Amino acid sequence: MQASAVKDASDLSLYIEEILDCGYTGQINIDHKESILRAIVLHVTTKRTPMLQQMREGLEVYNLIKVMQIKPNECRNLFVVGDDDKWRF
């Protein structure tokens, strides 16, 4: 769920299921849009931070963090969609 979709929406009924999936339990209407947005941002943050930490720990197993710091351009195609046409291995 993207907070920007809810932020720009004039009808939140289109997003009820996604809002509830983010853990929001209050009334879903325009008057409560700020509370809904806070719940979405909190949900996304608490979900992604552990995932990114786990990914970082996995990269450290092979010292890939150090390699990425030394050779960022060579490693970019591993993580940037569409950047792989620049490098051929």
Image (tube, rainbow, N blue to C red):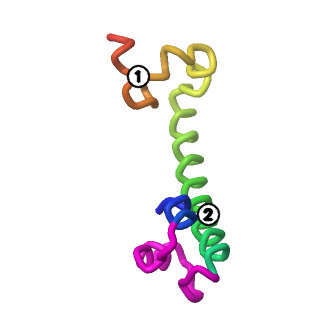
x 63%, y 20%: residue: 69
Residue 9 versus residue 12 in the image, above or below: above
User: What is the x, y in percent for residue 22?
Assistant: 52, 72
Residue 78 position by quadrant: top left
The C terminus sits in image quarter: top left
Circle 1 SS class? helix
| Residue 51: assigned label | none
Q: Looking at the image, is mark 1 or mark 2 earlier in the sequence?
A: 2
Residue 28 versus residue 47 in the image, above or below: below
Residue at the outermost front position: 10
x 47%, y 63%: residue: 1
Q: Amino acid at mark 2?
A: Val
| Residue 83: assigned label | 1
Q: Residue 18 colored magenta?
A: yes
Q: Which residues lie in the magenta part?
A: 9-31
- Cβ–Cβ under 8 Å for marks 1 and 2: no
Residue 41 versus residue 75 in the image, above or below: below
User: What is the x, y in percent for residue 57?
Assistant: 57, 41
Q: Amino acid at mark 1?
A: Asp
Give the alpha-carbon distance from disc 1 to disc 2, as whole Å: 29 Å
Circle 2 SS class? helix
For disc 2, the marked residue is 41
Residue 18 versus residue 55 in the image, above or below: below
